[in-house]
Image (tube, rainbow, N blue to C red):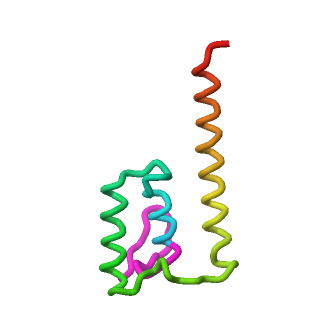
Amino acid sequence: MVFEARKSGRLASFEDRRMWRLLLARLHPDAGGDHDLFAFACAVRDEMSGGDHPARDTGSEETAAPFLRTWQDAMGQWSSGNRDALNNFWPR
């Protein structure tokens, strides 16, 4: 199955493991996502993959690099936001 992402002008496959990893990383409760939405996305992924669990993909370092950069950027922003919030919370 294929869909066209809005404003991107490119096609993305529902079988694209990288897409699922990025989506689930953003929806994961530990990353500030909603648990029910994460569980729903996992169920959709499992159904779309026909029983093949995409998380078992061992992928190469080259394919993991963009995901890791995205993850590091997101975690950097999250930790900076927390640090700023805590600095503004405590009176000086």
**Residue 87 location, x and y as percent?**
64, 25
In the rendered structure, the answer to whether residue 34 lies left or right of residue 59 reads left
* Quadrant position of the N terminus in the picture: bottom left
Residue 15 on image: x %, y %: 42, 82
Residue located 50% across and 52% down the image: 31
Residue at the top extreme, as displayed: 92
- The foreground one among 9 and 22 is 22
Q: Magenta segment: does it hold 55?
A: no
Which residue occupies 33% across, 87% down?
50
Residue at 48% in and 57% down: 26
Tally of numbered tags: 0
Residue 19's place in the image compared with 54, above or below, is above
Range of residues picked out in magenta: 1-18
- Residue 58, picture quadrant: bottom right
Residue 40: where, in percent of width, then height?
30, 64
Give residue 91's position: percent from left, percent from top: 62, 13
Q: Is residue 39 above or below residue 89?
A: below
Q: Nearer the viewer, residue 21 or 58?
A: 58
Does 13 appear in magenta? yes
Quadrant where the C terminus is found in the figure? top right
In depth, the one of 34 and 69 nearer the eye is 34
On screen, 32 above or below 5?
above
